[in-house]
Amino acid sequence: MRKTWITTGSSLTAPQNGKTVRLIRQVVKYGISGGLAAAGAWIVSIALYHLAGFPYVLDQGTGFIAGTAINYPVSRRWAFHSHYPTVLPQFTVFLTVTLIGLGINEGTLWVAVSRFHLWVPMAMGIGLFTAFVWNFTMNRWLTFGKLEKT
């Protein structure tokens, strides 16, 4: 059976795989929004630590808040195209998912280093990947999925 390719904007999409292409686009966009959030969190943390003399634990927490403040609107509008009318309930779910993701990241890091004696940067990568999968899945299904349909 021959596939007929259609043009959608600047890319080609197989009609049978439209949902797959949409999912891949969401994953890539969510990854980029997470990268922007991580960069923002890092810049805030470094600036507070080096320029303002904040304790590293405090500036790391502040950086996390800054990263979440960047990630939510970018994910909402760009990655998931959300039009949910009230932001606060949606942001609350997003923040809850993100905090659980932070716990998954930290827990994975701790287990990988303390139990399996992995190299810390490798363990960090595994933790970040695991948290990314959790965050994307739950935000796609719950925050920007089920909640949108209520």
Image: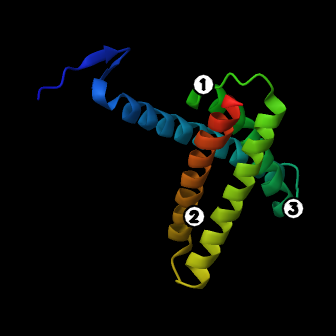
**For numbered disc 1, what is the local secondary structure?**
loop
Identified at 84% across, 33% down, the residue is: 88
The part of the image, by quadrant, that contains residue 91 is top right
Question: Residue 81's mark?
Answer: 1
Identified at 68% across, 30% down, the residue is: 148
Residue 8 left/right relative to 38: left
Amino acid type, label 2: Gly
Of marks 2 and 3, which one's residue comes earlier in the chain? Answer: 3
Where residue 2 appears, as percent x and y from the top left, is 12, 26
Question: Residue 127's mark?
Answer: 2
How dense is the environment of label 2, judged by Cα within 10 Å: few (below 14), some, or many (20 and up)?
A: many
Cβ–Cβ under 8 Å for marks 1 and 2: no
**For numbered disc 2, what is the local secondary structure?**
helix
Question: Residue 55's mark?
Answer: 3
Q: Is residue 44 visible?
A: no
Mark pair 1, 2: CA separation: 27 Å
